[in-house]
Amino acid sequence: MACPAMESAAATALRSVLSRVHVAAERSGRSSEQVRIVAVSKTKSVSVIQQAYEAGHRVFGENYVQELVDKCPQLPADIKWHFIGNLQSNKVKALLSGVPNLDMVETVDDEKVNIYADWSVYAHEIISFQNYLLSRSLFGT
């Protein structure tokens, strides 16, 4: 890591977040290693993401498919990308084929997207928020 006098703004911000997470985890009786920090990189340049990477961070979140597909090949392959935006069915193929190090899709809120993507083909962890499907089945709407 760079010496503190030359530390990037991204590294300084990351250090601050890590410190606050450590304090909060201790207060709650947990280890800070149990907390996963996803650095949301939407609208941030590749150079800013690279600075956070060089400061030791490896998990980044993006909420626009095209932005993620564009950034991914310009950054190290060991980054674990999380897609955190609303995933439209017409973007599923681009996301899955354009981001080989996609680690997680955090929002699948549309039955059409869920049917369209053969998620079993991919080794991605998926968090599915299908509340409207649940409520339809519970309340018969």
Image (tube, grey):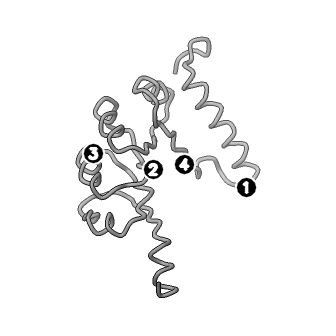
Q: Residue under circle 2?
A: 84
Say whether disc 3 or disc 4 marks the residue closer to the N-terminus: 4
- Circles 4, 2 touching at the beta carbon (< 8 Å): no
Q: Residues within 10 Å of mark 2 (few under 14, many from 20)?
A: many
Instruction: Determine the CA span between mark 3 and mark 1.
Output: 36 Å
Instruction: Determine the CA span between mark 4 and mark 1.
Output: 16 Å
Which amino acid, mark 4? Arg
Where is residue 133 drawn, in percent x and y?
Answer: 44, 76
Which amino acid, mark 2? Ile
Say whether disc 4 or disc 1 marks the residue closer to the N-terminus: 1
Where is residue 141 drawn, in percent x and y?
Answer: 47, 84
Say whether disc 4 or disc 2 marks the residue closer to the N-terminus: 4
Q: Residues within 10 Å of mark 4 (few under 14, many from 20)?
A: few
| Element on which disc 1 rests | loop
Say whether disc 3 or disc 1 marks the residue closer to the N-terminus: 1
Which amino acid, mark 3? Pro
Foreground mark, 2 or 3, reads 2
Q: Residue under circle 4?
A: 36
Foreground mark, 4 or 1, reads 4
